[in-house]
Image (tube, grey):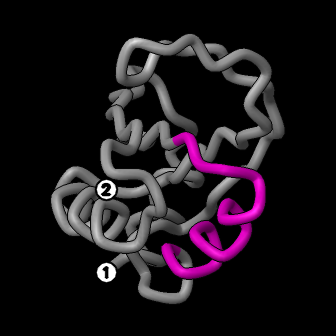
Amino acid sequence: MPTAYITAPRKAASDLAEFLVEEKLAACVNVVDCDSYYRWEGDVHAGSEESILFAKTTKARYPELKAAVEDEHPFDVPCIELFDEIDVLNSYGDWIDEEVQ
């Protein structure tokens, strides 16, 4: 079971999470607020209010989830990373499969 790690501005995070679940691209999305520090176009941005989205999906649906986030995300270059869990509770994995099929 992979988890997509996505960051987004706090204002956009809830809508993005709800969209991914409604479209059955993710069974569940956890949203955690954070402050981000990064360099963009030569400038350092300190303490930008963002959220981390942990989107639970399947390997089969991940390409669609990634494309949808690219389309819906307000940033030109969104952070979208894939983490492949090596150990998932079977019943939880079954639930994810069921929700995104």
In this view of the protein, can residue 1 be seen by the observer? no
Q: Is residue 12 left or right of residue 47?
A: left
Secondary structure beneath disc 2? loop
Q: CA distance from mark 1 to mark 2?
A: 9 Å
Residue at 21 percent of width and 68 percent of height: 64
First in residue order: circle 1 vs circle 2: 2
> Which quadrant is home to the C terminus?
bottom left
Q: Compared with residue 32, is residue 19 higher up or lower down, i.e. above or below?
A: below
Residue that mark 2 sits on? 58
Q: Which mark is residue 101?
A: 1
Secondary structure beneath disc 1? loop
Q: Is residue 46 left or right of residue 17?
A: right
Name the amino acid, label 2: Thr
The residue closer to the viewer here, 52 or 100, is: 52
> Which quadrant is home to the N terminus?
top left
In this view of the protein, can residue 53 be seen by the observer? yes
Region rendered in magenta: 7-20
Q: Compared with residue 14, is residue 44 higher up or lower down, i.e. above or below?
A: above
Label 1: how many Cα within 10 Å (few below 14, some 14–19, many 20+): few
Predominant secondary structure, magenta span: helix
Q: Are marks 1 and 2 in contact (CB under 8 Å)?
A: yes
Residue at 48 percent of width and 77 percent of height: 99
